[in-house]
Amino acid sequence: MLHLVMVGLACAWIAGRAFSDRFGWSQPVSWIPPAVLAAPVWAAVAVAGWRARPRRRRERATGRVPARPIAGSIVLGAGVLFAGVSLAHLLCVELGLHRLARRAPTAGEVSVRLVFWNQAGHRAGDLGPVFVPLEPTVLVLANRHSDSSTGEVARAFAETGPVHAAVGWPFDVFSRLPVRRWASTSLGLEGRSRAANDSSQRDSGWAAWYELETAGGTLVVWAIDLPSDPRAHRVPLAREAGRTLASWSGAVRVREGDGYRYEKAERPGFPVPDVVVGDFNIPRGSASLGVFLEEAGAAGMRDAFDEAGFGWRRTWPREWPVWAIDHCFVGQGVRARSFDTRDPGVGGHRVLVVECARDGR
């Protein structure tokens, strides 16, 4: 019976890693944290090896080599192999411990500290004391609760330096860099999300883009918020969301003095991003994330965690984070120098803190 359980868990682990969320049947399996599936196998292999020690001592003492069931030996050997592979996957892919050494800055690069948080409708009050100490260059807030005032956040930032704001549901941006142009759109998805009061509500998904002025030129940041309904198959949802962004042709807000004016988008589609950040409600490494980026015209972007993160950098649920569903991707000419998560002490998600760098020459 123990062997059957080991084989079942190992097969589920392999299926989740091989098929990801490409199919409706494989999505729930792929969303189970790999360590949850692998840990019982590790424990069973360790127990089997420990129990075999007295038998091996007796064999060495008597010089006899008793016959063993071939099937049991094969299963145990396969278990040992699986334990080694899955442990290496945990350490290198899930935890990224080979990236412990952070990259040093290079001459002429422009550093941008990007902070993202999905408040998800939870009460939090004044957010200034929460985020100003993080020293963001760009702060992106999603789904801000009505009791958190954008004016209070702007004033808190203004006390420590210049602040440029671009606010409007569901994203609010506070930046040390000038925000020259921006736009947002509903994704029109047939999705649902769970509210802070545990009720279910329709969620069509949202996206926005912001054009920031840096010493190294324009930096385009996308902000994404996809529905959280766990029953929705993510690949078609991601494909539809990406195609919506690729064909978007809405109005653009252009900064003019202390206000802004509207103008028509020059061409269909969101501008090519340098950074994409948001709450995707899709676990890290899922195939649907690549589908979204490709369909949206941002193929080839790299996960900032895979480039600079290490450790247990999950974001949901905030108190005991198990899933990494908030992501940051960087494009050509931009590299992630560090990737971290912080507990804001309020809300449903942890905060993403990503240090990005681009050539300023």
Image (cartoon, rainbow, N blue to C red):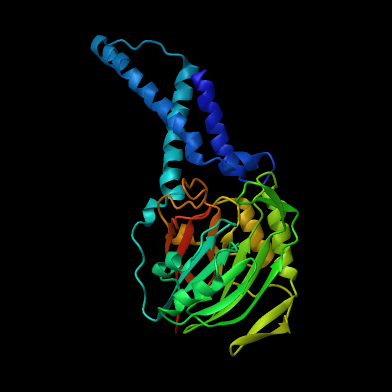
Above or below 105: residue 22: above
| Rendering quarter of residue 43 | top left
Q: Looking at the picture, how far across and down is residue 239, in whole percent?
A: 71, 57
Q: Quadrant of the C terminus?
A: bottom left
- Specify whether residue 333 is in view: no
Q: Which residue is at a point 76% across and 54% down the rendered structure image?
A: 190
- From the viewer's perspective, is residue 214 above or below residue 61? below
Placement of 162 over or under 44, stated as above or below: below
Can you say whether 133 is above or below 44 in the image? below
Q: Quadrant of residue 15?
A: top right
Q: Is residue 9 shown left or right of residue 294?
A: left
Does residue 201 appear in the picture of this structure? yes
Residue under the point 71% across and 54% down: 237
Q: Nearer the viewer, residue 26 or 59?
A: 26
Q: Residue at x 64, y 53 (%)?
A: 288
Q: Which residue is at the front of the view, 219 or 264?
A: 264
- Give residue 92's position: percent from left, percent from top: 42, 49
